[in-house]
């Protein structure tokens, strides 16, 4: 059993005082800077104005912005690809522990079917808790999801109810 380590009251009070004093020092420093800022800005107010120069907008600057945008988009897509590709990075060999399937039963609660060697466990997962709900005698082979929701009377609809197929139908594809 783990024991909680409690700080003595005097140590805790000294830590709180130290944090409060640092916060007070930062507040005073910001106040001094805010009071000194108008004086610094007033000194610049009476300086001779410089002629305004409009930035040249041409094909070169447009090309630079376009190339920068393409570079950023390329980095984002490369990072997404690398994340998908390296998802299993760090696992050693054939793992004997695999998540077969999972199902959300609440906002933070899930039911997870886990394969450990040749045995399957049904686990209830909630924030801070994992409970064994059932140990299956014979392994369950998950069926691929078809994303077709049955109608109220139990019959299967003519069109699947996933977003991709609904979008294709609405666009006439």
Image (tube, rainbow, N blue to C red):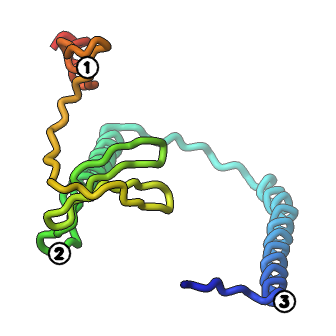
- Quarter of the N terminus within the rendering: bottom right
Q: What is the C-alpha distance between the residues marked 2 and 3?
A: 49 Å
Give the quadrant of residue 163: top left
Residue 173 on image: x %, y %? 15, 14
Residue name at image x 77 percent, y 57 percent: 44
Q: Is residue 63 left or right of residue 57?
A: left
The reply to whether discs 2 and 1 touch (Cβ–Cβ < 8 Å) is no
Residue on which the image places disc 1: 150
Q: Viewer-nearest of labels 1 and 3?
A: 1
Q: Which residue is mark 2?
A: 92
- Judging depth in this view, the residue of 62 and 31 nearest the camera is 31
Q: Is residue 130 left or right of residue 154?
A: right
**Can residue 86 be seen in this snapshot?**
no
Q: Nearer the viewer, mark 2 or mark 1?
A: 1
Q: Is residue 147 above or below residue 69?
A: above
Q: Which residue is mark 3?
A: 10
Residue 28: tell me if it is visible: yes
The answer to which quarter of the image holds residue 78 is bottom left
Residue shown at 42%/61% (left/top)?
A: 130
The picture places residue 150, in percent across and down from the top left corner, at 25, 19
Marks 2 and 1, how far apart in space? 41 Å
For marks 2 and 1, the one nearer the N-term is 2
For this view, does 26 lie left or right of residue 162? Answer: right
The residue at 70%/49% (across/down) is 49
- Other residues around mark 1 within 10 Å, as few (<14) / some (14–19) / many (≥20): few
Q: Nearer the viewer, residue 46 or 118?
A: 118
104 or 169, which is in the foreground? Answer: 104
Q: Residue at x 30, y 54 (%)?
A: 122
């Amino acid at each position: 059993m783990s024991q909680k380590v409690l700080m003595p009251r005097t140590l805790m009070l000294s830590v709180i005082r130290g944090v409060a004093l640092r916060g007070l020092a930062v507040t005073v420093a910001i106040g001094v800077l805010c009071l000194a800022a108008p004086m610094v800005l007033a000194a610049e107010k009476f300086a001779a104005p410089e002629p305004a120069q409009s930035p040249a907008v041409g094909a070169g600057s447009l090309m630079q912005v376009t190339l920068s945008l393409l570079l950023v988009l390329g980095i984002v897509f490369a990072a997404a690809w690398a994340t998908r590709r390296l998802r299993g990075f760090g696992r050693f060999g054939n793992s004997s522990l695999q998540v077969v399937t999972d199902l959300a039963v609440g906002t933070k609660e899930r039911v997870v079917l886990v394969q450990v060697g040749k045995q399957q466990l049904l686990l209830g997962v909630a924030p801070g808790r994992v409970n064994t709900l059932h140990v299956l005698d014979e392994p369950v082979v998950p069926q691929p999801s078809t994303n077709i929701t049955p109608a109220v009377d139990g019959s299967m609809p003519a069109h699947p109810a996933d977003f991709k197929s609904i979008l294709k139908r609405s666009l006439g594809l």
